Image: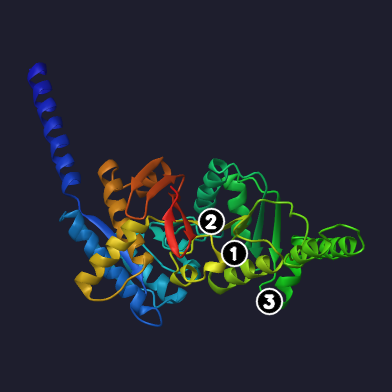
Amino acid sequence: MYNFLKIIWIFFLGFFCLFTSTIYANEKIKIGLLVPVTGDNKELGQQIVKSTRIALKDIGSDEIEIYLKDTNSNPNKTIESAIELNKMGIKIVIGPVFYKNLVYLDEVEDITFLSLTNRTIGLPKNVISAGINATSQLNSIKKFIETSKIKKTIFLTPKVDYESEIKKAINQSKVKIYKHYVYDTDPTKLTAQIEKITNYKIRKQNLIDEIKRVENSELVDKEKQIKKLEKRHTIGNVNFDSVIISDFNESLKSVITSLLYTDVSPKNKYIISFNQWFDESILSEEIIQPIYYPSINKKNLRNFENKFEKQFKEKTNFLSLLSYDLVGLIYYLSLENDLTDINKMFKQKNSFRGKIGIFDIKNNKINHKLNFYKIEDKKIKKIF
């Protein structure tokens, strides 16, 4: 009798395990999508929605369901929509897009938010920054500095609200910096600061003194040497061989122009910037080239842009590609983990190869392994 009951129990236990595993196997992957569908940034939000539709089609699984809610680019609307997603039993959300909309999300503890922001300081505990953060960029820059055997690097940071992000990233990446300067973005103040950083006045005076010395000398080729000196701007080298500039767009161009004015040329010093997203306006300005910078995989971005334009008859941007990748990332992690424990998915070490590049996940943080590019002679060349 005991053996018979034992056999029945083993059979029941085996059936129960099979039944529960079937439930988990058929469990839907519910993903919230929290983006601006109305308001000033609604076009961006609509592009992100379309990119997730492309992702669903490419994954080809009917196990994924996406639930869209509007943020209106407003923190109050964002938390209202997040609460609605929470009531629907959703545990993981792509979004919000903007850092300002994260402020109240710690009120919804049951949800993990994969925000598209690249900011990492001051995030609620349940928000993971999925954007291309400063640490990811400096990790790539560090690799370039080491492989290029660059010895002395100065770092230029604008006096803006992401200054603390830069300082944190320098510490985390352990990139070797000779000196770190914070500059004013006001062009009138910027030039004076760059002059000081590059010892321009001393180097300019060196030239003036050398011209006077030659003029007062009895050298046979005095006139020839004077003409040669007059073509120069300074005498004396600067105390660095590369410059990292954590700036963008016209402000970046202003800094490089100021460096040129002080006789520091990209032709003889490495000018390294943060991610410029293949800015076409930089391509056209040959005088400030070559410029080096980290970024996402250019070929994959162009392929995605072509696919998006072919399907929706409109252009898109890198945030849409990031959203596309995040759908794939969640699906990949769900294959490896129990969906009932979302936090575990992002605490343990994982790597995921998306269209943007490689996502490195550990301790609720996402870093990206980025490619590295050079703009020279109006062309973009991939370094690694």
158 or 165, which lies in front? 158
Which is nearer the N-term, disc 3 or disc 2?
2
Question: Is residue 148 something one can see in this rendering?
Answer: yes
Q: Circles 1 and 2: CB distance less than 8 Å?
A: yes
Q: Mark 2 sits on what residue?
A: 134
Residue 172, compared with residue 198, is above or below; it is above
Q: Position of residue 66 (x, y in %)?
A: 25, 63
Q: Residue at x 35, y 79 (%)?
A: 42
Which is nearer the N-term, disc 1 or disc 2?
2
The CA distance from mark 3 to mark 2 is 23 Å
Q: What amino acid does circle 2 point to?
A: Ala
Residue 186, label in figure: 3
Q: Residue at x 68, y 76 (%)?
A: 186
Q: Mark 1 sits on what residue?
A: 162
Q: Quadrant of residue 78?
A: bottom left
Circle 3 SS class: loop
Q: What amino acid does circle 3 point to?
A: Asp
